[in-house]
Amino acid sequence: MKKLYLITGATGHVGTILVSELIKRGEQIRALVLPGHGTHLPQGIDVVEGDITEENSLVPFFNRNGYDRITLIHCAALITVASELDPRVWSINVQGTENVMRQAYATGVDRVIYVSSVHAIPEKPEPEVITEVNHFSPDLVHGQYAKSKAAAAQKVLDYAEKGLNVSIVHPSGIIGPGDVQTRNHMIRTIHAIAKGTIPVALHGGYDFVDSRDVVEGILACEEKGRAGECYILNGHYITVSDLLNIIRKMRGKAVRKTVLPHSMAKVFAPAAERISILLKRPSPLFTPYSVYTLNTNGHFSHEKASKEFDYEPRDIVESIRASLP
């Protein structure tokens, strides 16, 4: 049987690890990239230029070309913690996802995995553990990125209702190897801590998962996950203080006990974001939304994925070490 993997977001953090793993398995891959963005992809991959926000450009990407079975893994997304509303977030994450699903449905793609985010899932009050839901709404989550991922997830489930063989995976905060362009907010934060430019911790914490575990979960879900079902792929909860000091120890630096209170961080965050924008730095690390996220309920359960396809995340210290420059 002649099989092909269609990958969107192949040059992103998860996409890079996913492509590498599929190559190891000897699979045939076709990657959708923006014009001029596929230069560092490995040789042997069928690279198609297109834009998920322009549906007509997706037609060559979905050409079956005589393949017996096609699996689509939709990773492409725009992630942001910025306060200013960016129309590209909705265009890429929602309309782009709808375009991709419509093409997948129209061309009879055999299997689809949509890479969503735990941010699409409504938060529960602590100490409740957050589990999968079967309905999504932008009104139930906070922040432009979360709202866009919730809206997109519901559109994907709507296509599952129509008969598309699609499952959704929800990674938590992704760290680990593969972010070759250093665009991941948390990877840049880890690098800043390692360099000593973030000397103190903020109050709070979150759940972080290794990019390699996300890819293993995606491919296991492709094989064993059920159509129309959602699966959380989280890792381990860690406080910012513990994260900072694990990295400092790895770099041979003294442990820091100072933790900036949440109330103080909320006051400073808007000014820090404005300064970063004025200095024309890459997307700010310290924003009101990032401070908010670190003080939300970050306790998720991957029990469903573990039961249905043996998902199990690796030790977080290993993931932190693999994230360092």
Image (spheres, grey):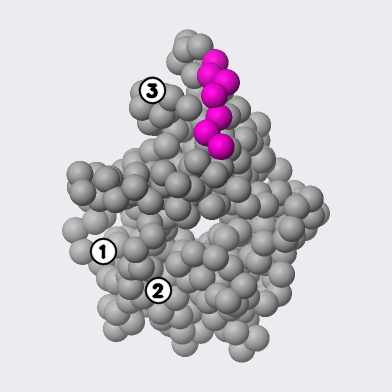
What residue would you read off at disc 3? 196
Q: Residue at x 47, y 55 (%)?
A: 289
Q: Nearer the viewer, residue 120 or 318?
A: 120
| Mark 2 secondary-structure assignment | helix
How dense is the environment of label 2, judged by Cα within 10 Å: few (below 14), some, or many (20 and up)? many
Q: Nearer the viewer, residue 237 or 43?
A: 237
Label annotation for residue 136: none
The region drawn magenta spans: 255-261
Q: Residue at x 21, y 49 (%)?
A: 278
Q: Is residue 115 left or right of residue 167?
A: left
Residue 218 position (above or below residue 285): below
Q: Nearer the viewer, residue 202 or 285?
A: 202
**Residue 76 placement: quadrant:** bottom left
Image x and y of residue 294, in percent? 57, 46
- Whether pointer 1 and pointer 3 mark residues with C-beta atoms closer than 8 Å, the reply is no
Q: Residue at x 55, y 75 (%)?
A: 138
What residue would you read off at disc 2? 90
Image x and y of residue 134, in percent? 71, 74
Task: Kindly identify the amino acid type of the residue bearing the numbered disc 1.
Answer: Leu
Residue 246 position (above or below residue 29): above
- Whether pointer 3 and pointer 2 mark residues with C-beta atoms closer than 8 Å, the reply is no
| Mark 1 secondary-structure assignment | loop
Label annotation for residue 34: 1
